[in-house]
Each structure stands twice: as structure tokens, then as C-alpha cells.
Image: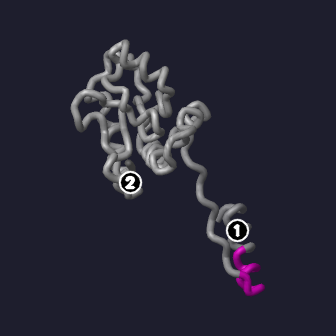
Amino acid sequence: MTWLARLFVFGAKRREAAGQPLAPPPAPPPHRSAMLTPRDLARLKGLHPDLVRVVGRARRDVEFYVAQGLRTVEEQRELVARGASRTMNSRHLTGHAVDLYPVSDVPIPKMTMRDMAPVISAMRRAAEAEGVAVVHGADWGWDHPHHELDRRAYP
């Protein structure tokens, strides 16, 4: 037995003898890749707390970054004009949508559904675990980075 192990055993026996309950071991800190970065957190500001919770939970499973959350009407108009968005009725305008991209060597314009699949799967699992109704852009076949709160549950 190492000196460190003997020290822990000795301390536990002393607390037990004094009638004090044994303290559970501290939880390990989350792995660095499981934590949202300050930039991700800044981009999640203004989003519905249920969506933020799902994103945080999904981040424990797969590494990704938050590309965009809340948008202004001007930003949305510009995206529609460029063809990057198809509607002025975007859930990004109300804080009910987020765009996520995997951390990858593949440049965004060349990303395929296969590249996006781990993020989409992690968001599906996280939404189910949190009991939050989320619709994914992949469900309608063309906006794979997009995840939004279901309009039926979150009008």
C-alpha cells in the first residue's frame, strides 16, 4: 500500500471513529473537450434556457462549436439575400435555434451529412435525455447544422 493510500485509510478511520460520515470522493472535473468555450457561451446568450441545456449536454458527447444562436432581423435579411437562409420567420430571431458545427479538418463548405452526423446524433440524444422537443435541420434535409425547439412545444 502506498503512503498516499495509507493516509486516506487513516483519515477515513479517524472520521469513522469520531462518528462523522465519510465524505464521498470529489467528482472529477469535466474533460476539457466536454466544456463549452467562452466563445460558445457568448453565442448562446439570448437563447431559450432549454436549448442551452441541450447544447451543453450534447457537448459532453461530441466536440463541436456554436456557430450562431440569436440573430437580429438585419442579420437574417442579409442571410436570406445571400441565399444562406430561406425564411424571415427563422427561429434564430426568437432565441429558439442554434447552428452547430463539428470540430473538424474539413472546411465548412465541404462538410457533408456524414461530417455532421455525430453532432446531430449527440443533439438527438441530449434532447431526449433532457425531455426537450427539438427539431433538427437534417430532418428537413438541407440545414444540417441547424437545431431548433419544436414550435408545437415552444410557440
Residue drawn at the location 37% of the way across and 14% of the way down: 81
Mark 2 highlights which residue? 132
**Which dot, 1 or 2, sits closer to the camera?**
2
Q: Is residue 141 left or right of residue 123?
A: left
Q: Amino acid at mark 1?
A: Phe
Magenta span: chief secondary structure:
helix
Above or below, comparing residue 69 to residue 83 in the picture: below
Quadrant of residue 117 in the image? Answer: top left
Quadrant of residue 46 in the image? Answer: top right
Q: Position of residue 59 (x, y in %)?
A: 46, 42
Mark 1 highlights which residue? 8
Q: Nearer the viewer, residue 136 or 23?
A: 136
Q: Earlier in the sequence, mark 1 or mark 2?
A: 1
Indicate the secondary structure of the residue bearing disc 2. Answer: loop
Magenta span of residues? 12-20
- Residue 6 among magenta residues: no
Indicate the secondary structure of the residue bearing disc 1. Answer: helix
Residue drawn at the location 42% of the way across and 32% of the way down: 100
